[in-house]
Amino acid sequence: MDDTSEEQDGKAQSIAGQRAIKRLMVPVRKKIRIAQLLAFLSGVLSIAPYVALVELGGALLGQFDPDRAWRIVMILIGAYTTRLFLYFLALLATHVVDLDLRSQMRREITNKLARVELSWFTRTSSGQIRKSIQDDTATAHTVIAHGPVEKLNAIVSPVCLLAYAFYLDWRLGLLSIATFPLYLGMYGLSMRGMGEKTAQMDTKLARVSSTMAEFIAGISVVKAFGKVGQAHRAYLEAAGQFSQFYHAWAMPLVSMSCLSFSWVSIPVLLVVNLGGGAALLAAGVVTAEKVIATTLIALVLPGAVMTVAMISWSYQLAGSAAVRLVNMMDLPVLTWPEIGMQPTSFDIRVQDVSYSYGETRALDQVSVEIPQGAVTALVGPSGSGKSTLATLVARFADPDEGRISIGGVDLMDMDEQTLYDTVAFVLQDAQLIRDSLAANIALACPAASLDEIRQAAQAACIDDFIMSLPRGYDTVVGDDTQLSGGQAARIAIARALMKDAPILVLDEATAMADPESEALIQQALTRLSQGRTVLVIAHRLASIRGADQIVVMNRGGIQACGTHEQLLGNAHYQALLAQGEVKENVK
Ligand SMILES: Nc1ncnc2c1ncn2[C@@H]1O[C@H](COP(=O)(O)OP(=O)(O)OP(=O)(O)O)[C@@H](O)[C@H]1O
């Protein structure tokens, strides 16, 4: 991507970020307004010390009046305490709002995740989800809890102070901002395009962290093949690009903003305000206390501009986080009927089903009948749409076109409980949870007794292994032990056996298992398949030969359907067998 399109992209991201922040704040807008009202009042009261200074000067330096001086001090203390108290209340209110909003967003996202299409999880990493729920909600903190109050205070306070300086004497007022146009002009120039640049920085940083994550995730393979240099090149390139971009952006920015600050540095402000003030004093048009008050006001004004700039930048930084949060909240969810229909038989009918992942058409007008109580094997080259078809039957997503029904009932007319009581699946990635082996097996029926769990484990050929572990069925996956792919697959089969659903969607997870483990898995699968409607993504010739029906897929369509013997004359089927897309059983 060239610099101009990156900048345009950055601009669009920056606008989208600010829109997303506004959208996130909608539920708390009223409360934020109340906090801002408190911050406004506190900002107005910031003039109290300067008013007191001038009045005290009058009471002590002019006609000496200790009672009046005392009253002024008391009023000053009261006003100053009230200012601090109001500011404290405003920040307290926004922090409470922030905590509420963050927990509301986290709850909303987790509720969403519970209803989102299961296929979304296959294309989204757990790292991305964790980042949104944990980090992005925390990034939003500055713009919810601090931004609205601190920015308003940083604007109201100097405006009131300036108004008071002009009220004291317009010439002193002008002196207090004499160098400001130069400062603001140069500072404004240095900050040009800040929003776009910040969005670009975020994109480049994300690239650095994703290339780093890819490099670390694949380090063992990369090392084993002696390609370390090649693999971390992507990371080095991303880091180099970020460094060049940051250097090109930050160097002129830093020098320009340093130059701009010199116009409001303390010596310059003192020379201008005290020098000019002394001249006016000598001319007898102002008093000493007024000169001191306006000089002090001039000294605090640049800080306020800095605060506004810093908070504006934090809004830019929070923009990308807000966009990710809004995207999560807007995820499309599967809808389920309140009262679902119950299938009375368990044959599956796929009618004219099409499904695309973005631009990729994975299934194109697929129709197939999967008879009850029989084993149907899906075979086809890699990418032909086998997994997509199998997961649509388990309603991981809804077809773009066409319908899938079980026992004549459209999947969309079944409630969630009925569907998942009817369909169990064992996929390549066994997905064990960080809990005891017993809990992993009894996931679908937590009330199951240890005896029942052991029966399922025995049928899945994994009981012996579990009993050999020091903590047996209490062994916690991930903490006490790590399981091999074959062992995890058998736990998943035991889990499906316990669930005892009439339909089984199966991706033969034997590809990576050793021969002994493969034989055990095969034995377990045979037991699991008995008496059920089975849709299996087959990787072995043995399971294909034994299947009641073989569906040959290619490029998202069905090429042929029949038994092994019937298909032997089919060119696609022969090609699959010849190319070894399905392998001989090792048993
Ligand atoms: N999450 C995804 N995002 C984008 N495209 C995808 C996704 N999953 C699959 N595809 C694409 O959809 C098509 C069908 O993929 P699918 O995984 O269903 O095929 P498959 O026959 O099961 O392949 P394999 O045997 O390699 O698992 C392929 O072109 C694939 O690249």
Image (cartoon, rainbow, N blue to C red):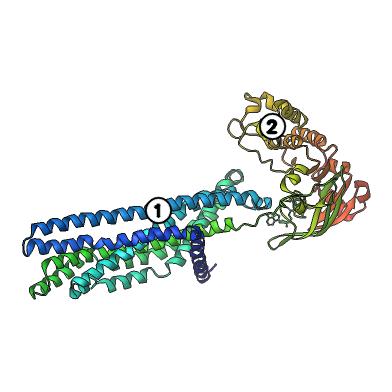
| Quadrant (top left/top right/bottom left/bottom right) for the N terminus | bottom right
Q: Are marks 1 and 2 in contact (CB under 8 Å)?
A: no
Whole-percent x, y for residue 337 in the image: 72, 52
- Secondary structure beneath dot 2 equals loop
Q: Considering only order in the chain, which callout, 2 or 1, is on the residue closer to the N terminus?
A: 1
Whole-percent x, y for residue 41 in the image: 32, 61
Amino acid type assigned to the residue bearing label 1 in the image = Ala
Work out whether 91 lies above or below 160: above
Whole-percent x, y for residue 170 in the image: 20, 75
Mark 1 to mark 2 CA distance (whole Å): 46 Å
- The total number of labels drawn is 2
| Residue 344 or residue 144, whichever sits in front | 344
Q: Which residue is the site of mark 2?
A: 447
Residue at left offset 37%, top offset 64%: 251
Residue 332, quarter of picture: bottom right
Is residue 244 in view from this perspective? no
Residue at left offset 41%, top offset 61%: 33
Q: Which mark is residue 93?
A: 1
| Residue 479 or residue 406, whichever sits in front | 406
